[in-house]
Amino acid sequence: MHVVVSGGGIAGTALALALRTAGIGVTVVESRPADHGEGAVVRLSPNGMDALRAVGAHQPLIARSFPLVRSERIRPDGSRLGYALGADPSCERGLPRVMHWPVLSAVLREQAIDRGAEFRHGHRAVDADVEQPAVTLADGSTVEGDVLVGADGANSLVRGRINPDGPEPERLGTRTVYGYAADPGCEPPPPEVLRSYLGAKAFFAATRDSHSGGCFWFTSLRAPDPRRRDDPQNTDELRAEMSVLFAGEDTIAPTVVGNSDRILSFDDHALPHVPRWHTDRAIIIGDALHVAPPASEQGAAMAVEDGVQLARCLRDHATPAAAFAAFEGLRRDRVEAVVAMGRLGTSRAHHPLARRLRGLRTKAKRLVEWQRKPPMGRGWAYDHHIDWPQTTT
Ligand SMILES: Cc1cc2nc3c(=O)[nH]c(=O)nc-3n(C[C@H](O)[C@H](O)[C@H](O)COP(=O)(O)OP(=O)(O)OC[C@H]3O[C@@H](n4cnc5c(N)ncnc54)[C@H](O)[C@@H]3O)c2cc1C
């Protein structure tokens, strides 16, 4: 069997790595060059690390990332409003890992190539045949296989071929801004701590990259008007916008923003339900299948889980159609629940009443419970284990 994958982001690359681990041939077609260097900070949740461990690919990522032990929220006066552990530290899955997005992408790709995957960078698929598996590239050539997998992100071409009447990801009216300052000009929180400074207009969450000493940060804003698709991710413009947003705040935010080398802004979307996941020979995975808002903290982890689980199914079943049915059985409830969790988290973070209620709940919890037991990360989403040798039949 040979699998053609359209899209070499996180899902497509994790799939290629897992397919080669299962001894299946794979060609990945990716529109960006290998060294595009785009992307800012990404968190890979413990369930994503578990999926990488299943295919023996976790150690190189551990070497190039750092663990997130604790998140905390700080009031403008410097007092601590609340905190949560990154995950249960005694759990075998470990803690969430934080890294530059290009590091995650490169670590997966290097291992996939080492195991024999073929990558064709700089080639955009302009058409896809989901019955006779193939993609057509911009130069008119085609790449054919026994199976086609669309791992081509939120605006997936392959999803549109499998579901000609939609759906499309829904805008949530918010956006997430990510930044990185190599020399932040101040002392960021230590790498194990993600600290959110509550500002007058927005929070500013920051931590130090233990590898470079730089500062990763992000914030979330209401954004009623969509950013144009062709908007350049212009760091200078975004730095000016963010400087106004955090002006006058007595936290590290104005200094870090002013010294940031890279700032990216993404409109938040959700794709909660795709009716048709596959034909007999083609399927979609990752953001092409289930766009989870950043509040879920699961986008990258679910992409890795998808890749590893689909490879298991293709390894175990006699036909692609049977493998896809098994994959959907394993995945549908879980991915739809994760997207729902992310949507809820986004509305809680931005609706004024929900914010007020969260503040009250935090205070009550601190009084009653937190003295005895520290709050843990998102247990049910993290608590997912892939047993690679076990069959999916
Ligand atoms: C360049 C980039 C930077 C990112 N940076 C961050 C970040 O800093 N923090 C964060 O939390 N999330 C980031 N994300 C989003 C995050 O990777 C995804 O939400 C999540 O990991 C799901 O991954 P995915 O592989 O399904 O989708 P994506 O990561 O979106 O990958 C899809 C891939 O398909 C390729 N593609 C799309 N259409 C075609 C086509 N027609 N032909 C060929 N290739 C195609 C795209 O170039 C892309 O590489 C980034 C995504 C990208 C593409």
Image (cartoon, rainbow, N blue to C red):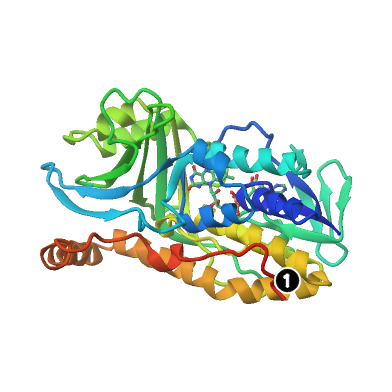
- Percent x, y for residue 230? 57, 42
The quadrant where residue 373 appears: bottom left
Q: Is residue 68 left or right of residue 38?
A: left
User: In the rendered image, which residue does mark 1 sit on?
Assistant: 324
Residue visible at 66% across and 57% down in the picture: 156
Q: Nearer the viewer, residue 72 or 50?
A: 50
Mark 1, Cα crowd under 10 Å, few <14 / some 14-19 / many 20+, is many
Q: Is residue 291 left or right of residue 243?
A: right
On the question of residue 164 being in view, the answer is: no
Residue visible at 77% across and 49% down in the picture: 125
Q: Nearer the viewer, residue 381 or 353?
A: 381
Residue visible at 13% across and 67% down in the picture: 364
Q: Amino acid at mark 1?
A: Phe
> Which quadrant is the N terminus positioned in?
bottom right
Disc 1 residue lies near ligand 1 with CB under 8 A = no
Residue visible at 56% across and 47% down in the picture: 58
Query: Is 315 rendered above or below residue 232?
Result: below
Q: Is residue 141 left or right of residue 264?
A: right
- Percent x, y for residue 264? 46, 39
Q: Nearer the viewer, residue 327 or 288?
A: 327
- Percent x, y for residue 242? 33, 36
